[in-house]
Amino acid sequence: LARGVREPDLAGRHVVVSAGGTREPLDPVRFLGNRSSGKQGYALARTAAARGARVTLVAANASMPDPAGVDVVRVGTAVELREAMLRAAADADAVVMAAAVADFRPATYATGKIKKKDDQDPAPIALVRNPDILAEISTARARSGQVVVGFAAETDDVLANGRAKLKRKGCDLLVVNEVGERKTFGSEENEAVVLGADGSETPVAHGPKEALADTVWDLVAARLE
Ligand code: CTP
Ligand code: CA
């Protein structure tokens, strides 16, 4: 094979990847959101397609064009993301949750724009929890032997928090990266360690998001029968 051309080791497989970050609306013009660009999820989708997989990319508010040869489902909120992921995961060999899901959403949605009132303090915003999509997909295992992968961005005690999170979510692999003010968000590069439910630990050196994506697919491929 020519350099840069991968063995189609995911041919005949259906993989589902979520990307981007959910936005939870307060009113028609405002939302609670996060800084996820979607680049890592898009890199996962592109590399899986290059390795022969049928790919469904569930994109939450990402502004990038659809990758060639990938089925893209666009969503806004965590609840919409859950719907789309459960539907796509039903016949998937692997599911990768690279999207940043808002943990909470506003308890109420104002159908008209919220207005400020003279001489009044703003009302606090009540929040409710969003469903945990990764935990739900890990528990359900829509298909036997399905490999489920999560991502975690941590600022402190990265490995210990990652191990605990892997267990809590019940996924097979958890890609843990350290984030901070200037790290990862919107950047072209990433650095991570991939924790396995089998106790494995795979460090991924600082480099392009495609390299991390390929390592994830290597680990997924090894776990598919
Ligand atoms: N995730 C999810 N549904 C949620 C929250 C998170 O599917 N409601 C997924 C993310 O897509 C990611 C993984 O779970 O793959 C870990 O997300 P993270 O925010 O690190 O985990 P939380 O359980 O929300 O923990 P924390 O309190 O640290 O935010
Ligand atoms: Ca969270």
Image: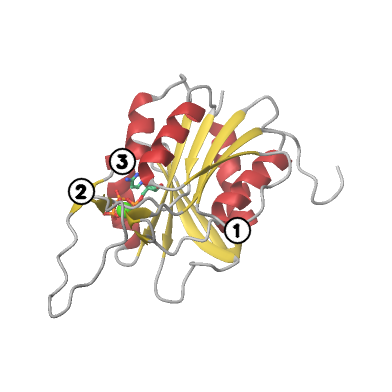
Residue shown at the point (48%, 67%) measured from the top left: 185
From the viewer's perspective, is the residue at label 2 or at label 1 nearer?
A: 2
Residue shown at the point (73%, 42%) measured from the top left: 50
Label 2 amino acid?
A: Val
Residue shown at the point (55%, 45%) measured from the top left: 216
At which x and y percent is residue 74?
53, 43
Colouring method of the image: secondary structure
Structural crowding at the residue carrying mark 1, measured as other residues with C-alpha within 10 Å and reported as few (<14), some (14–19) or many (≥20)? many
At which x and y percent is residue 29?
39, 61
**CB under 8 Å between discs 2 and 1:** no
Q: Is residue 204 visible?
A: yes
N-terminal of the two: label 1 or label 3?
3
Distance between mark 2 and mark 3 Cα atoms: 12 Å
Choose between 132 and 126: the one closer to the eye: 126
Element class at badge 3 = loop
From the viewer's perspective, is the residue at label 2 or at label 3 nearer?
A: 2
Name the residue carrying label 1.
Answer: 209
Name the residue carrying label 2.
Answer: 128
Q: Looking at the image, which residue sits at the far top?
A: 144
Distance between mark 2 and mark 1 Cα atoms: 33 Å
Element class at badge 1 = helix
Structural crowding at the residue carrying mark 3, measured as other residues with C-alpha within 10 Å and reported as few (<14), some (14–19) or many (≥20)? some
Which image quadrant: the C terminus?
Answer: top right
Name the residue carrying label 3.
Answer: 132
Structural crowding at the residue carrying mark 2, measured as other residues with C-alpha within 10 Å and reported as few (<14), some (14–19) or many (≥20)? few
Distance between mark 1 and mark 3 Cα atoms: 25 Å
218 sits to left or right of 172: right
Choose between 115 and 108: the one closer to the eye: 115
Which image quadrant: the N terminus?
Answer: top right
Q: Is residue 198 visible?
A: no
Label 1 amino acid?
A: Lys
